[in-house]
Structure formats: structure tokens, C-alpha cells
Amino acid sequence: MSSTVREPKAPRSPAKAAPTPAPARAPSKPSIVLDPKIPAGPLEKKWEQHKFESKLINPANRRKFEIIVVGSGLAGASAAASLAEMGYKVKCFCYQDSPRRAHSIAAQGGINAAKNYQNDGDSVFRLFYDTIKGGDFRSREANVYRLAEVSAAIIDQCVAQGVPFAREYGGLLANRSFGGAQVSRTFYARGQTGQQLLLGAYSALCHQIAEGNVTMYPRTEMLDLVLVDGHAKGIVVRDMVTGAINSHAGDCVLLCTGGYGNVFYLSTNAKGCNVTASYRAYKRGALFANPCYTQIHPTCIPQAGEYQSKLTLMSESLRNDGRVWVPKQKGDKRSPDQIPEAERDYYLERKYPSFGNLAPRDIASRSAKEACDDGRGVGPGGLGVYLDFGDAIQRLHENVVRERYGNLFDMYNQITGENAYKTPMRIYPAVHYTMGGLWVDYDLMSNIPGLFVLGEANFSDHGANRLGASALMQGLADGYFVIPYTIGNYLAPEVGKRPTTDREEFKKVEAEVRERTKRLLGIKGKRSVDHFHRELGRIMWDYCGMTRSAKSLDRALKQIPPLREEFWKNVNVPGEDEALNVSLEKAGRVADFLEFGELLCLDALERRESCGGHFREEWQTPEGEAKRDDEHFQHVAAWQYTGDDSKPARHIEPLEFETVHPSVRSYK
């Protein structure tokens, strides 16, 4: 396929957005050239050469720098601990009461690394290729190869920290398979891998806190970014206990704030997960890349009722031993044990024989939706498919399955009241992860000098679909092994340039944050914040969910602005500012979701192709698979804020493939 990239024609203009009452400073709009700063040379030499050529800062000078890290999940905690250990002074902020309660703790299944312990043909290049292909050829080669290259060191780092990975009978680390790969490269700690990895990073962070190199600010939420002479030099935060709003200055800012999946209201994310930090940076001039790339996870517990406020993930690792099926007959209401083998459709094994139940998430999710749309879904409302462990229990015995997945089965039992050892689990796709995020170059720096973005908050490594067990890999790679090298390229010439918070730039942004807060509290409407969030989620899921079309996206873009306008006229935010006020916290986050949701839908409308998790109904093969348009859309789409009343500007970064030739993405 051709690698030529042409700017697509302008789509239909969406409905004009209702102006948001909150003040926002529109950035200047110079012509933007997206330079990813990918090093020259062979792919396998780029990172080593770049590390050698990167600027160094001697240990005595490192103590002169103060780095702001926002977020304490795997990316934030690992970056804060690593930079502090190098000698930098670090301020780390999180809205949880402890860094160890970051949402990374919820990751279950495992972390990928190319160690080839199973001797089944794995390698750095194979992990690189699987990731590029898994992302439907919509990610940078250089970034993905670096991720695969440092993956093995992550495991060594975590083992040294005491992370209790599962082990084989002889003591070697165990591996299991995950979707989108035909090798076993996923390291795991039962169904608690994210928790154990976060505890490892947290222990390193606590050591640096005790040493006085990290100052921790829990229960503190970033509400805006401060630029000084065009550089990111600070943030404005709110103390969530006292309500106090104040500013912090630094030599640079690292955003490690996760993804924006809660724009859909129902997702597997913790309720506190939000887009505010990234969106505030976007409104200060940072480019938002590929927001339409959202991942739907195929193995979630189906929604039980309208009262539900979030969904629960069942780890993809379950698809190692669980078989996915639905009845062959439409409307079959028999219990699963009454449906004989010949009347079951193991549709993933049928459609994708090479990968079977380990097909990538986007493909497995769409296949489940197709089965349910065909009237063969199971459970209440027919919105579910079976994940059956009957064969595995018969082959391995229940005690082995219990040892591998016991806590996941317990969690399923507590939520549904069903025993998955005796009857199949019921699962259905749900929003899980977001591949889009703030645009960054090879050094993980955004187009705003001094603003670095790590982990799920950036767009860099996964393309249009993330393979399972790669989120933990990217978060720790960015924090432990990338940012400690690349941050010096920005900081080296910045010594002695840290501003103080009494500058006019800080006072102005702080005043805007106070005014926004005052407006939210002063509306005194009749609708709760959750009402608006739920309505936005309905629009997003119905019109920009597992499948999208020009017609559905037009509907979303017509419905979101009036909903946002009603929010600013009729939302009810009780309580006060200078006090603990959960409703105020939610209101600020939902206000940003109401703007960001429109940007996401606009990006989906303009990307007139199907790729990975972005499935446009107009672009599919006769077999119902995603159909890319490499001639016109083999690029990153990065959006620039141009004011509340105007359409954002779309910029592109062409994706050049020197090593992997983009091809039809097949798992059959």
C-alpha cells in the first residue's frame, strides 16, 4: 500500500458549539509543523544512539531543578521515583488519598516483555511487529520498537523491587498468552498484576519521599496549566480537602494522568478518572492527537441496570483458558448446560482459527456485538456472550484454574452471585482504554516546550488499538527507562530559569480557575452533575461507540452542544468552594467531558476509514473487517484549540514505515 499522505477533504461542519462560560485564553495560531524528532539510523540502533546523543546534566546541577509530576499511577510513580533517585527535586500530585490508589491498581492480566522464556519464538522484533500490527499500522515505528526494546528491563526492575510474579515449578518466571499474539510473553501476578506493579513503584516512590527528594501532594487536583514565555512552568491545583486553590512552579511539567474513557460515563475506569489535566493543557495550546481511538474491551461484566455507574473488567487473561460462545439458534433461552456442543457457536474460533479466543480486543468486541445484534446474545436483554471454563476445568482440574484466576472468579461471584466454576461467565464489551492523547515527540514532550506526557495520557505507542498487557508495559517504560534520559534535552539549557508563582502568568490562570469554580457553584440549577454525565455517555456510546458512521456522528455533534449549554444553565452543584466538595470536583470534570466529547466525535467524523478500535460502518470489508485508507489517512491527526466559538484546527504527522510494510490486518 502506498505510504503517501494527503490532507483529507473537509467534512461537513458540525453544529456550532455553545460557548462555555468559563474563561479560556486562546493560544496564538502559528503554522504548526509536527516534528516527531525520530533519530536517524537503523531502527534497532535509534534508541541507543539517541541516549548517547542526549544532553547530560551533572548530579550537582540536577539538584537545582524542580520537576512537577501530575499523577501517581505506574507512569507517574515510576517517573517521580526515577527522577528523584537521579537527584532532581520532584513534586508529585494525585487526587487519591494515596499514590497506591491510582487506577493502575485495577489492571489485572499482566505485562508484556520480550524475554522468550517459553522458547516459543518471541523476540524484540516480534513484540514490535505484533504491536504495530495490533494498532492497525497507525503508530510510529521508532516509538514502538523502543517500547519492545526496553520491555525486558522492566521485568528485571520489578523483580528487584519484589513484585511477586507467578513462577513455574522450577522457580523461573511464568508467562501466559494474551490477545493479538501467538507467543506467551505476558508476565503476571494472578489477576492482580497492576496492583503488584504499582506497589513496586510506590515503594520506590516512598523511599524518595523519605529521602526528601519527593514532596507528595495527595488529595490535590490539577485544574490548569501555566505557561511562562510559551513554556510549561507550573500548574494550578485545588486542595480537595480544604478547597484551597494555589499554584506550583517548576522547571517542567510531566502529565501522567491516564485516559479519558469516562467520557462514555459507563466504562471500566475508576469513577475519578477524567480528562481535565489533558484538556486544560489542550486549551493552553497542547495538541490532542487521535482522540477517536478508544478501546472497547470484550470481557466486561454486562451492565445490570440503569442504576449502575461503572462497569467491571474481567481480565483478558481469562481468554487463555475460557472459550467464548453463543447459541447457534436465535433467541435460545436454555441454560448453558442444556445447550449441547453441536448447538454452540464458538465464533472466535470459527472466524479466526489462527488466534481463536485470543483475537485482539477490537475484533473480539465487534464479534460479540455482531452475535448479540443477530439475536443470539445471552442473559438479560440478550447483551452478553458466554466465557466458558468447562473444558479447562476438565483438562486442568479446578484447582489449577483456581490458582491462575481465583481472585477474578471471586470478584465475578461477588458481583453477579454466580459460580463461574459451575456455569459460564457472561461478558459483554465495554469502554476500557484510550489510545489517543496529547501529542508527543520521541522525547515524550508535547508541542509545548517543557510539557511532557507519559503513559495513557499520550498517544504515542498503541496506534488505533492496544494489545492486552501493553498498558502496564508502556507506563513503566516511559517512567523508568525513557523520561530519565530524554528530559535532559529540555532541562539542560533551562538551569536557573524556574519562575516564581508571584508572576502575572500564575496570578492570571489562578484567577480564571477561581472564576470557573465560582460560576459552577453559582448556577443553582435543578439537574445533578451525574444527570449530564449520564446523558453525555448515552450520546457517546450510541453514536460513537463500537461502531460509528457519518450519520451517527452528525447526530452526536448536534446533541452535545445543547446538552453542554443546558449544563451551564441548569446544573446543581451544592456545597461550598473552600471545603470538601465532591460534587464540585465532578462538575469540573464533567464540564470538560462535555467539551472533549465533541472533539472526539469530530475526530471520528474526519477520519474516513476504519482502523483498530475506530470502526466506521461505511468502511469495512465484505467480511465485516476494518478497512483502512492508507493513501489518505496514514497519519496522526493532532487537534489545536482555536477558541470556544471556532472549530479546532487539524494538523497531521505522516506515519512513515521503513521496516514494516502496512498490510491487511488478518488474524485468520
Image (cartoon, rainbow, N blue to C red):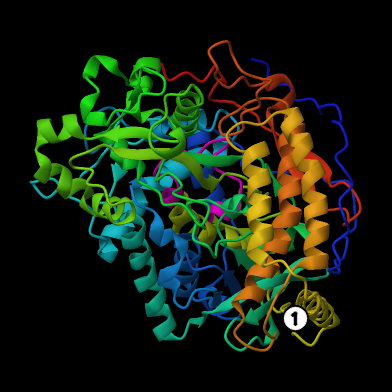
Quarter placement of the C terminus = top left
Q: Which of 542 and 236 lies nearest the eye of the viewer?
A: 542
Percent position (x, y) of residue 478? 50, 55
Q: Which of 612 and 90 lies nearest the eye of the viewer?
A: 612
- The residue labelled by disc 1 is 499
What residue is rendered at 69% in x and 55% in y? 446
* Three-letter code for the amino acid on which mark 1 is drawn: Pro
Percent position (x, y) of residue 35? 73, 44
Identify the main secondary structure in magenta: loop
What residue is rendered at 65% in x and 86% in y? 243
In this picture, residue 419 sits left or right of residue 88: left
Residue 459 lies in magenta, yes or no? yes
- Can the viewer see residue 644? yes
Residue 633 figure quarter = top right
- Which element type, helix, strand or loop, lies under badge 1? loop
Q: Which of 614 and 332 lies nearest the eye of the viewer?
A: 332
In this picture, residue 463 sits left or right of residue 15: left
What residue is rendered at 87% in x and 65% in y? 25
- Can the viewer see residue 66? no
Quarter placement of the N terminus = top right
Pick out the residue farthest to the top.
Answer: 622
In this picture, residue 467 sits left or right of residue 49: left
Residue 471 lies in magenta, yes or no? yes
Q: What segment is highlighted magenta in the picture?
A: 455-473
Q: Is residue 39 above or below residue 532?
A: above
Percent position (x, y) of residue 9? 85, 26
Residue 585 figure quarter = bottom right
Q: In this view, does 494 lie above or below 259?
A: below
Residue neighbourhood size for the residue with mark 1, other residues' Cα within 10 Å, grouped as few (<14), some (14–19), many (≥20): some
